[in-house]
Amino acid sequence: MTLKFALISLQALLSVLEPKDPQDDVVAEQYLTDHATFNATTLCWTEDFAMVSMPEYNRKMQKLIEKGFPKALVKKTLEAVGARLNVALKKLCS
Ligand SMILES: *[C@@H]1O[C@H](CO)[C@@H](O)[C@H](O)[C@H]1NC(C)=O
Protein backbone atom coordinates (compact mmCIF):
# COMPACT_ATOMS: atom_id res chain seq x y z
CA MET A 1 0.00 0.00 0.00
CA THR A 2 1.44 3.37 -0.98
CA LEU A 3 1.26 6.46 1.19
CA LYS A 4 -0.96 8.08 -1.44
CA PHE A 5 -3.40 5.17 -1.28
CA ALA A 6 -3.40 5.20 2.53
CA LEU A 7 -4.17 8.95 2.61
CA ILE A 8 -6.97 8.58 0.04
CA SER A 9 -8.47 5.76 2.13
CA LEU A 10 -8.23 7.85 5.29
CA GLN A 11 -9.90 10.80 3.56
CA ALA A 12 -12.74 8.52 2.40
CA LEU A 13 -13.18 7.11 5.94
CA LEU A 14 -13.40 10.62 7.41
CA SER A 15 -15.76 12.05 4.81
CA VAL A 16 -18.42 9.31 4.66
CA LEU A 17 -20.31 8.50 7.85
CA GLU A 18 -20.81 4.79 8.57
CA PRO A 19 -23.15 4.85 11.58
CA LYS A 20 -23.95 1.13 11.15
CA ASP A 21 -20.23 0.26 11.36
CA PRO A 22 -19.07 2.91 13.83
CA GLN A 23 -15.76 3.70 15.49
CA ASP A 24 -17.76 4.99 18.51
CA ASP A 25 -21.06 3.26 19.40
CA VAL A 26 -22.39 6.11 21.58
CA VAL A 27 -21.85 8.74 18.90
CA ALA A 28 -23.33 6.48 16.21
CA GLU A 29 -26.40 5.75 18.35
CA GLN A 30 -26.96 9.47 18.93
CA TYR A 31 -26.48 10.18 15.21
CA LEU A 32 -29.18 7.61 14.33
CA THR A 33 -31.71 8.30 17.11
CA ASP A 34 -31.28 11.96 18.17
CA HIS A 35 -29.87 13.89 15.26
CA ALA A 36 -30.60 17.34 16.75
CA THR A 37 -28.52 16.52 19.85
CA PHE A 38 -25.84 14.98 17.64
CA ASN A 39 -25.68 18.26 15.68
CA ALA A 40 -25.52 20.34 18.85
CA THR A 41 -22.75 18.10 20.24
CA THR A 42 -20.66 18.33 17.07
CA LEU A 43 -20.98 22.12 17.13
CA CYS A 44 -19.97 22.24 20.79
CA TRP A 45 -16.99 19.90 20.30
CA THR A 46 -15.85 21.88 17.27
CA GLU A 47 -15.90 25.08 19.33
CA ASP A 48 -14.21 23.45 22.35
CA PHE A 49 -11.51 21.41 20.63
CA ALA A 50 -10.98 22.81 17.13
CA MET A 51 -11.25 26.58 17.57
CA VAL A 52 -9.44 29.23 19.54
CA SER A 53 -11.86 31.47 21.44
CA MET A 54 -11.94 35.00 20.09
CA PRO A 55 -11.20 36.75 23.42
CA GLU A 56 -8.13 34.50 23.86
CA TYR A 57 -7.05 35.05 20.26
CA ASN A 58 -7.53 38.83 20.54
CA ARG A 59 -5.51 38.89 23.80
CA LYS A 60 -2.63 37.15 22.02
CA MET A 61 -2.92 39.55 19.05
CA GLN A 62 -2.83 42.53 21.43
CA LYS A 63 0.22 41.20 23.32
CA LEU A 64 2.23 40.85 20.11
CA ILE A 65 1.09 44.21 18.70
CA GLU A 66 2.18 45.86 21.99
CA LYS A 67 5.66 44.44 21.37
CA GLY A 68 5.75 46.51 18.19
CA PHE A 69 4.89 44.01 15.46
CA PRO A 70 2.50 45.16 12.72
CA LYS A 71 -1.08 43.92 13.12
CA ALA A 72 -1.26 42.20 9.71
CA LEU A 73 1.99 40.32 10.33
CA VAL A 74 0.86 39.30 13.84
CA LYS A 75 -2.45 37.97 12.47
CA LYS A 76 -0.74 36.04 9.67
CA THR A 77 1.86 34.59 12.05
CA LEU A 78 -0.67 33.56 14.72
CA GLU A 79 -2.74 31.80 12.06
CA ALA A 80 0.35 30.01 10.72
CA VAL A 81 1.28 28.56 14.12
CA GLY A 82 -2.19 27.56 15.35
CA ALA A 83 -2.45 30.59 17.66
CA ARG A 84 0.40 29.43 19.92
CA LEU A 85 1.72 32.66 21.43
CA ASN A 86 5.31 31.61 22.21
CA VAL A 87 5.77 29.96 18.82
CA ALA A 88 4.40 33.08 17.10
CA LEU A 89 6.74 35.30 19.11
CA LYS A 90 9.77 33.17 18.19
CA LYS A 91 8.77 33.26 14.54
CA LEU A 92 8.25 37.04 14.61
CA CYS A 93 11.67 37.56 16.24
CA SER A 94 13.56 35.32 13.82
C1 LIG B 1 -28.07 18.44 11.34
O1 LIG B 1 -27.11 19.14 10.58
C2 LIG B 1 -27.18 18.82 9.20
C3 LIG B 1 -26.00 19.51 8.50
O2 LIG B 1 -26.00 20.87 8.77
C4 LIG B 1 -28.54 19.25 8.63
O3 LIG B 1 -28.61 18.93 7.28
C5 LIG B 1 -29.63 18.53 9.41
O4 LIG B 1 -30.91 19.01 8.98
C6 LIG B 1 -29.49 18.77 10.90
N1 LIG B 1 -30.48 17.94 11.61
C7 LIG B 1 -31.15 18.38 12.65
C8 LIG B 1 -32.16 17.42 13.22
O5 LIG B 1 -31.00 19.49 13.13
Image: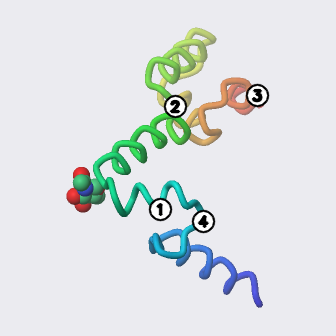
Q: Amino acid at mark 1?
A: Ala
| Residue beneath disc 2 | 52
Q: Distance between the Cα atoms at labels 2 and 3?
A: 20 Å
Quadrant in the picture for residue 49: top right
Q: Which mark is residue 23?
A: 4
Q: On the image, numbered disc 3 is attached to which residue?
A: 90
Tell me, yes or no, whether the two marked residues, 4 and 2, touch with CB atoms within 8 Å: no
Q: Residues within 10 Å of mark 3 (few under 14, many from 20)?
A: few
Measured from the top left, where is residue 70 in percent x and y? Answer: 53, 22
| Residue 79, placed above or below residue 14 | above
The answer for how far apart the CA atoms under marks 4 and 2 are is 27 Å
Residue 32 higher or lower than 38, as above or below: below
Kindly identify the amino acid type of the residue bearing the numbered disc 4: Gln
Q: Secondary structure at mark 3?
A: helix
Q: Which residue is mark 1?
A: 28
Q: Amino acid at mark 2?
A: Val
What residue is rendered at 35% in x and 43% in y?
Answer: 40
Crowd class of label 2 (few under 14; some 14 to 19; many from 20; radius 10 Å)? some
Under circle 4, the secondary element is loop
Whether label 1 touches label 2, CB < 8 Å = no
**Residue mark closest to the camera, 2 vs 3:** 2
